[in-house]
Structures are given as structure tokens and as C-alpha cells.
Image (spheres, grey):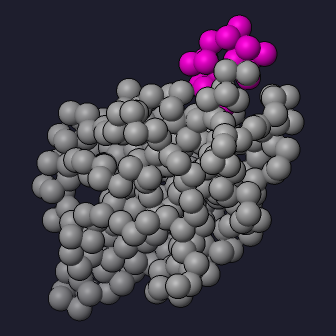
Amino acid sequence: MEGIATPVGEGLSQSAPAIQWYPGHIAKAERQLFTQLAKVDLVIEVRDARIPRATGHPRLQRWMKAKPRLLVINRRDMINEAARQAWDHWLRERGETPWWCDAKVGTGVKQLQEAAIRAGGQLNARRAGRGMRPRPVRALMLGFPNVGKSALINRLVRQKVVDSARRAGVTRTLRWVRLGQELDLLDAPGVLPPRLDDQRAALLLALCDDIGQAAYDGEAVAVAFLRLLDGLQVHPAAGISSSGVLGRYGVPITRLEDNVVDGWGWLEAAAARHTSGDTARMAQRLLDDFRRSILGPIALELPPEPA
């Protein structure tokens, strides 16, 4: 994976343990996927709009081989329009057609369904040419944990047919879902590389709750988040308000001698004010507020700038 375009400040401290998460149900699901891939006609890849590159699986092209793919960028409501347009332009320049969705309210879901059905029409035209009867297109919904795959399926079917929640690891088994007479969807657990070698991308996954909380130190990730926001302020499309964190918590952000944001100092001061000095609770509150968009729509990744 190429490096992200925007800085992550100092990120996690050298003393913080590496962020790694590859639970048994993901390893099992990955093995099951290989047996199902031969049966699917289309892959629907779902990514998180806040971190569309960090949620791109490095092995996906190898798994898909020559199968057609639809790229879905979910949670479009969690970034501003400037960031969405910047990503849309960058992806289209590289031959991608992104389908922007918000599974929470259904934005873009009908257009995604129509695109999948069109892919099925091409499949059945080829089947008819060989004297075979038409059948529903079989589509695999694939992506990292907690990017909204199950929520998208529920929106497509217009009822809750699979469990969905905004945390990683809810879907643990593969399940086929019939969508009318034209489309069959395979809901799969989120898949991750066995090892997260890019720790900058791993940090972004942790911030967006796209990996399990057991994988990281919440306080260290919260401090890295403050430094990341500081680095992103120079990019208007990121949507960082200069008074966002300060305005919500009433605690000024100071800097160390090397001009790096004093994240630990801020965390301790905010904890003293809001969580009776409990820095772990304060860190969780900060991360939860970001994940619920209480701090506003924030894009943690922006397209790479031209060299």
C-alpha cells in the first residue's frame, strides 16, 4: 500500500506496541472465501470514506483474478463534499468508478443496486449466447471489518436480514442473501491482511474502529489522533475546525519544544475536567466522539498530491 498523502504527526510513540489484529474468525472466513470465489460473478468492494486507501485490501486483485468489481465508498456522510470530490476525481483519473453510499440512510444504494444488476445483464447475455438460461448475478460483498457491508446489504434488501453494528467483528460467517430475481449477495466477515505492516494505515483503521479495540492502546491512539488532526488542519478538504476539539472540551492544545502537539498533556488536562482524571475514559470519549461525527465530518486521508 502506498503511503497516505497527509501526515500523521508523530503517530504512535516508539514505546507503544504495534497495532495488529487477525482474530480466528477472520482467518477462517478467508479460507471459506476461496471456496466461494469461484461461484461469484461480481465483487463489490466496500471502503470507508474517511480512509479509502487504508481500507483497500492489498490482496484483493489477486483474489478476484478477472472478475468484475464495483468500488463502493461507504459513509460518505462522515466527510465533507470537498473531500468526496477530491477522492472522486483522483479515483476516476485512475480508471475507477466509485459508488458513494451512506448505508445509514440509504444514499447511493439504489444506484449501486442498478450497477450490480447491469453487470448481471452482461453475464446473462453471455449465458444466452451459449444456450443457457438466465440466473441472478452472484455478488460478493467484501471489505475490511466495520466498513458497513452488512448495513449496505440490509439497505439493498430493505429489511434487516444480517446483523449490523458500528464495530468490528459482528459478521463472523458467510451468508447468501437473495435480492429479488436478479441479484444474490454473499455477506462475508471483514478481511484483513494477516499482518499490518503499514502502521500508519493501522492507526487510521484503529481511529475509525475498523479493527478490534483489543488491537491497540486507546490512550496512545487518542494522542496520535490529536497530532493527526493538527497535521491535517492545513488541508481545508479534511474538514478540521481549528476550534473543534478545543470548543467541545474546553481544553487548550499546547505544543512541546519540537512544535509537536502535546497530546499527553491535553489528555491529562481533559481527563481532569471531564472524566475525574481517568485518561483511559477520556481517550475513549474522544475517539467515540470522532466515530459518531460529533467533531464534524473529518477525512483522515486525502488523495496524494502530485509529485
Residue depicted at 85% across the width and 28% down the height: 250
Q: Position of residue 103 (x, y in %)?
A: 59, 51
Q: Describe residue 232's horizontal placement relative to residue 176 as left or right.
A: right
Quarter of image, res 6: bottom right
Q: Is residue 285 magenta?
A: yes
Q: Is residue 301 above or below residue 87?
A: above
Residue at the outermost bottom position:
129
**Is the magenta region chiefly helix, strand or loop?**
helix
Residue range highlighted in magenta: 270-287
Q: Position of residue 14 (x, y in %)?
A: 40, 39
Residue depicted at 73% across the width and 22% down the height: 270
Of the pair 130 and 233, the residue shown nearer to us: 233
Q: Is residue 36 magenta?
A: no
Where the N terminus falls, by quadrant? Answer: bottom left
Quarter of image, res 99: bottom right
Residue depicted at 85% across the width and 44% down the height: 243
Of the pair 262 and 202, the residue shown nearer to us: 262
Residue 99 visible in the displayed image? no
Q: Is residue 258 above or below residue 272?
A: below
Q: Describe residue 97's horizontal placement relative to residue 83 as left or right.
A: left
Q: Position of residue 85 (x, y in %)?
A: 68, 74
